[in-house]
Amino acid sequence: MTTAPDPTSAHAWNLVHAPFTATTWRRTAYALLALPLGLACIPLALLGAPTARWQRGLVRRFLGADLDGRPRAGGLPHALLATPLNLVTAFITLYGWSIVPLNIGWPLRAGDDYSDAWGGPTFAGAWAFHAVVGGIGFLLLMPWVVRGLTAVQFRVARSLLS
């Protein structure tokens, strides 16, 4: 007699496995590269460079989605309209991923007085709290945050570049 797989175990595995997949890191790379490429495309589009093709290539390479058809708008409208979103996405992505090593390595940046630190008054309690909540917690959370942010970026790119 075989038993049906537990669907909750698959969800738990996806949660734990997500930070270590290539897809997560490609999306993270897109979240960070979209801003400088978009900013560089603004003056280059004014000079007649094929910036829409470059932006579509970035989407294809890092998000794995092919934007079919000829762009409705050129690279300049996409670069201008996506810049605020790209800025917010890059900031949240950098900040969120930087929290992981900062909190796992909390003892390296902790001062002499850790009695008021979260998880204190003991050194072990403060380190455990920072490592579990800030380190491992954000390690498990950030792939899903980046996935959501890049999904919005993809929708903007799809609407303007295909």
Image: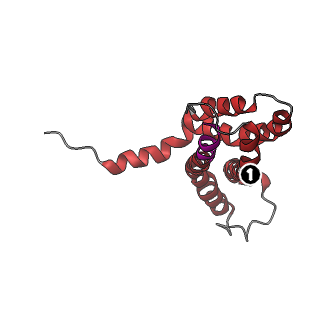
Q: Position of residue 71 (x, y in %)?
A: 64, 34
What residue lies at 64% left-to-right and 66% top-to-bottom? 119
Q: Which quadrant would the C terminus be assigned to in this image?
A: top right
| Magenta-colored stretch includes residue 158 | yes
| Mark 1 neighbour density, 10 Å: few (under 14) some (14–19) many (20 or more) | some
Residue 15 horizontal/vertical position (percent): 48, 47
Q: Is residue 111 above or below residue 64?
A: below
Residue receiving disc 1: 91
Q: Nearer the viewer, residue 101 or 161?
A: 161
Secondary structure, mark 1, is: helix
For the magenta stretch, what is the residue range?
Answer: 153-162
**Residue at coordinates 63% horizontally, 41% vertically from top-left?**
157
Name the residue: 86% across, 37% down: 43
Of residue 77 and residue 40, the one placed in the foreground of this image is: 77
Residue 43 part of the magenta segment: no
In the displayed structure image, the side of residue 123 where residue 40 appears, left or right? right
Q: What amino acid type should be assigned to the residue bearing mark 1?
A: Phe
In the rendered image of this protein, does residue 88 appear above or below residue 50? below
Vertical placement of residue 57 versus 151, above or below: above
Q: Is residue 17 left or right of residue 121?
A: left
On the image, the x and y values in percent for residue 154 come to: 60, 43
> Compared to 34, does 66 lie above or below?
above
Q: Position of residue 109 (x, y in %)?
A: 79, 54
The quarter of the rendered structure image containing the N terminus is: top left
The residue furthest left is 1
Main SS of the magenta segment? helix
- Name the colour scheme: secondary structure
